[in-house]
Image (cartoon, grey):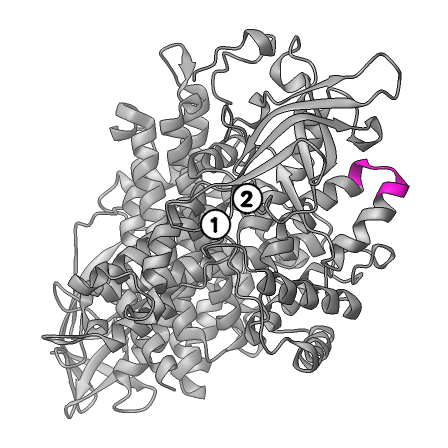
Amino acid sequence: MDFTDSPEEVAYRTKARAWLEANAPKHPSTASVIGEEGALDLDDMARAKAWQAKKAQGGYAQITWPKEWGGGGGTPIESVIFGQEEAKVGAGGGGYFQIGLGMCVPTVMAFADDATKQRFVGPALRGEEIWCQLFSEPGGGSDVAAASTRAIRDGDAKDADWVINGQKVWTSGAHYADFGIVIVRTNPEAPKHKGLTMFWIDMKSPGIEVKPIHQMSGGSNFNEVYFTDVRVPDSQRLGAIDDGWKVSLVTLMNERLAVGGGSGLDYSTIMKLARSLQTSTGSALSDQAFRQKLADWYVQSEGLKFTRFRTMTALSRGQTPGPESSIGKIIAAGQLQDLANAAVEMEDQFGIIDDPAMAPLAAAFQGGLLSAPGLRIAGGTDEILKNIIAERVLGLPGDIRVDKDVAFKDMPRGR
Amino acid sequence: MNFDYSDDQKFLKTEARKFLDAACTPAVVRGVLDDPARSYDEPLWRRIAEQGWLGAAIPEQYNGLGLGRIELCAIAEELGRVCAPVPFASTVYFLAEALMLAGSDEQKAKLLPKIAAGELIGAFATSEGPGAYSEAGIQARVEGGKLTGVKVPVTDGDVADYAVVLAKEAGRSGLYLVDLSGAGVTRETLKTLDPTRGVAKLTFAGAAAERLGPAGEGAALAEAVMDRAAVLLAFEQLGGADRSLEMAKSYALERFAFGRQIGSYQAIKHKLADIYVKNELARSNAYYGAWALNAGAAELPVAASAARVAASEAFWFASKENIQTHGGMGFTWEVDAHLYYRRSRQLALVAGAPAVWKERLVSQLERRNAA
């Protein structure tokens, strides 16, 4: 165990820091991962894209990807080091590309032909094109394999087009994405996992309609996406027909690594707030009950940080990170909710004020309180993640399934 | 950066597990549990000494193995897994660490080789009654090299040869080394939550005491010893927490209710996932503590506090939910679940309760923040 940089790591950090000092944007993008901002801010997106392009040029976009695909050809630890240094200069903006580079493009790289990869990987890496992931549906959120959006072949030719009809939901960034990967039902006669197929699609295809969802937090980062007779060439298929579930597992395996991002609110932020609030017995930081909770948050945050480091060590030793990375989101989301609420209650009557001009720290805690429920659901609910840990890490039995061997069309469904 | 045991350390850990699986079976632990006259297993203690573990982190000049603290952490984790009924922590994490931290060359030369050889059991005595001790409240007094006062509870005080005692001399606190076989020492064995470990009340009536470390630094030195011990104890707690999870898991797989394995119900699955999450966070904090301890880093007080808080919570949670998962069987004397429940209390209290460490952690953070 060594929590200090090796000489090589010191050299890399020095180089990365120098590069960041010379290149980091003066006015970075401020978009958050969960998207609390109101309407899409095109200027903000432009700033994020410019920064992504610059990183790609410097070899700092996707540090662990091979150089032949425009990556940095670096190690997972180097990626962590760059991330730490990038956070220090507050460069921001990565949220627009996280889903594409973390989930969609790796899926394309794993299943598409060379020409397709040549066409898409570079532009995505440079931030020129943004991707979204079209999995969840009104009838299946946690249960992705229950997708009922239908793709039917137009004719019997071997390379006949597909025609897609149906609806996706909770699609992050669909309102600004250029491309997406979509999982659709190609065989309703087969059990649900065996009749799905994956395609990549152009989000500007005729018949695609994107409607932003008004979140309880006020923002609109997620969308409903409607497909009406959307024509997709068979060349856009990823993986074999009816084998889309296997393809989706590659995408989802990367999801929890990608969604684990922090909210920026942690023990140090609430400590700052507590220090600034006076009570009848001194600053709120002197309250014993609060100090005990503060210690718990610190221990959780640090534990999480070092758990990520352990994952990186496993990666750098050539091991595949397992589902244990699910821990990150369970802890981060739950802690955000607890911590934001503790802060709001600490502000007492004033805590109800959600106006950034008045509330402490520009209403960051009020914002966190309202976005936390989304974080506990997006990218795998707490409950699904616990199932994953129980089944795939601990080896406990899967739930009793009433849908496993039933043809999809005969599967019991609610509204 | 590297956030895992090295291959050599993993090898040591695997070997330690093999050894303890054979040498420290549940029957050995229960031998101590069920016999009020015994507070540790002597044959196991001797065999542990033969392995060289008592001197793992003691420098070679004092006949130790001269390995790092991380190797000691690996051993601690394995001892925790099997609820080893031996005075390892008192002797190695407390006495040996206190000597290495504050001992004179003479004190080290006199006692460290004996510790390494398994010829000497140690104890660390700070508490004098209910509630966390404070420097101001310490009543034990040293005058002209003679100690007077009461320390209670003292883990392994019933069998220890030497104790490090926190006491006051001319109004200032100090750590004192006391030969417990000397005159003026009375021991009274106490009934505790964890009968697999020995605990005593020590009464000193003019017992010979020599100072360990500078005068007036007793409370600070005691904290520094506690920091070191906290990291090592965290690994024992981690071992116990992981073992509790394994026990819960295997019972959840073999026990059927309503025609299914109970481990197929989400109420059980999510409970065990919660244990897993706490254990992993505790492991990560413990690793950071191990690094800080081994490197002698300035971060040690914060890292040790975090390691102790996380490990205490994890072991408590794992051990109580392991009993719950076992249902009625878990409440029986025969099932080992209660051994871990008891040990989780012993380990969480022996170096100060979690609330004390949380406060210590936050004060450190305040100081760091102010600097």
Q: Is the magenta stretch mostly helix, strand or loop?
A: helix
Chain designation of label 1? B
Residue at mark 2: A324
Closer to the camera: disc 1 or disc 2? 2
Bin the neighbour count of mark 2 within 10 Å (Cα to Cα): few under 14, some 14-19, many 20 and up. some
Residue B114 percent location from the top left of the image: 44, 70
Instruction: Report the magenta residues as a range.
Output: A110-116
Residue A76 percent location from the top left of the image: 69, 59
Residue at mark 1: B280
Tell me the amino acid under the disc marked 1.
Glu
Magenta stretch: includes residue A113? yes
Mark number displayed over residue A129:
none
In this rendered view, identify the residue nearer to me: A122 or B245.
A122
Q: Quadrant of the C terminus of chain A?
A: top left
Chain designation of label 2? A
Residue B7 percent location from the top left of the image: 67, 56
In this rendered view, identify the residue nearer to me: A372 or A285.
A372
Q: What element carries label 1?
A: helix
Q: Compared to A56, does B277 lie above or below?
A: above
Q: Compared to B253, does B203 lie above or below?
A: below
Bin the neighbour count of mark 1 within 10 Å (Cα to Cα): few under 14, some 14-19, many 20 and up. many
Q: Compared to A103, does A158 lie above or below?
A: above
Residue A274 percent location from the top left of the image: 26, 71
Residue extending furthest toward the front: A206
Locate residue A379 relative to residue B196 in the image: left or right: right
Locate residue B99 relative to residue A284 in the image: left or right: right
**Are dots 1 and 2 in contact, CB under 8 Å?**
yes
At x 25% / y 67%, what residue is drawn? A291
At x 73% / y 78%, what residue is drawn? A15
Tell me the amino acid under the disc marked 2.
Glu
